[in-house]
Amino acid sequence: MSAVPGGPPAAPAARPQRTLKAPVEFRGTGLHSGKEVKVVVRPAEAGTGVAFVRVDLDEHPVVRAVGANMKARQRRTCLQDGKAEVYTCEHLLAALFALGVDNCSVEIDGEEVPGLDGAATEFFRALRDAGSVELRATRPIWAVKHPIYVRDGAASLVALPGSGKLTIEYHLDYQARNDGGAGARQIADFALSPESFEREIAPARTFVFAHEVEALRAAGLGKGATAQNTLVLGPDGPQANALRWDDELARHKILDLVGDLANAGVDLDAHIIATRSGHGLNMALVQRIQEEREREQDQGEAPLDSGLDIRQILKLLPHRYPFLLIDRVIELDGFQRAVAIKNVTINEPFFQGHWPEQPIMPGVLQLEAMAQLAGVLLLRKLENTGKLAVLWSIDKVKLRGAVVPGDQLRIEVETVRARPQLGHVRARSKVAGRLVAEAELKFTLVDA
């Protein structure tokens, strides 16, 4: 698939976002907590992404599956937002990602997603059987243009330019121990598609070496592990179940990596080479991907996934010069997230009276720019047509750095909660990747 004979591969075409046709329910035991958990995966509107809802906690806090919420935990993926967290979610996320289900609300009555078969087959087949529907929004695609590399000791992950799809190559190398502990060397390599995932990756089970079991249990982990959902590898190989493939361990590592890459929030055109990597390094790669996407957008190197020009902004906001403080919305993720830019020049009227000899953009105006972008995000909803977003609460404000003429302010807002008459967003501003301000804003929506 080349643009010209012998030329570079053509960019893959953008596809519509998808959600489920019907809810899907799972019940089971957490691999690490040993607790019984119920999960209901429900359809959601475009731009929601995968949002876990802790229905067992007061106010049902939402934890979105995004790179910023990934936290380092031993032997599992953890997503945390505030005090709410969800862990061991990588197998469910991998199944959703492989199926191209981009938006869903995952109601969970505990902190750990059930382990089920110790792999992703049960998740995949139930979600596939529920069916999916296309939505009126485009799924972002991001292509690796130059190598991205993360490393931790002998473990590494390299993302290279792809050929129009996501391919993953995993090199597993556990050295045998002097005390008789098992070792393993395997290589697996797959191009991701729903068919290859179901057939070649989803059935690969989680595993542990026999010499690790005691330490894991001492750490409070593996309470729900059984011979049916976990391979235990002794000096002579699996203790209970035979391997489904000679390279099942490497395939399971690919399964985990796919689930962690789902938190990037985009379809990926890349070839990824993994060597001895685990969840911590996977998280580092997801965050590097996000940083590179932001850099490309800020420098105009990448086509915008979606956005609004100044004329479209003026149709949504009542603000005008000199108080309109966003120049362009460069990314819109449904009604969940928005990114805008403000080019700060010496001609700004506020510089005439605010430290004119050492011009610095007032922090309150950075907050106003965040509030205006939040207004754009909230007022795009059809149900909010003809309304005004009136700011009535600002919390957790931190001004972390000066903004001066010549800077380009990157403003990001993310919906925490949206109701018919209430909006709650988390906002932050950056300059050249440096965080300069952050806050939480609440609005009431009133008739204009």
Image (tube, rainbow, N blue to C red):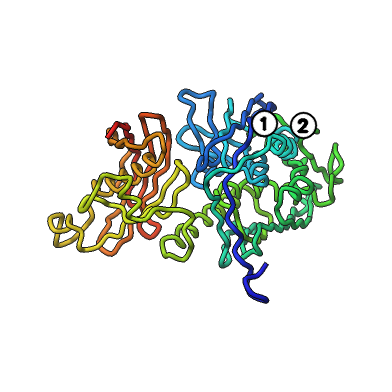
Q: Quadrant of the C terminus?
A: top left
* Location of residue 354 by image quarter: bottom left
Q: Which of the two labelled residues, at mark 2 and mark 1, occupies the earlier sequence position?
A: 1
How many marks on residues? Answer: 2
Q: What residue is pinned by disc 2? A: 226
* Location of residue 4 by image quarter: bottom right
Q: Position of residue 215 (x, y in %)?
A: 68, 37
Q: Is residue 179 shown to the viewer in this render?
A: no
Instruction: Using the image as rendered, state which of residue 103 and residue 30 is in the foreground.
Output: 103
Q: Is residue 13 above or below residue 390?
A: below
Residue 25 in the figure: left or right of residue 71: right
Q: Is residue 276 above or below residue 97?
A: below
Instruction: Using the image as rendered, state which of residue 196 and residue 61 is in the foreground.
Output: 196
The numbered mark at residue 130 is: none
Q: Position of residue 259 (x, y in %)?
A: 64, 45
* Closer to the eye: label 2 or 1: 1
Q: Position of residue 362 (x, y in %)?
A: 22, 51
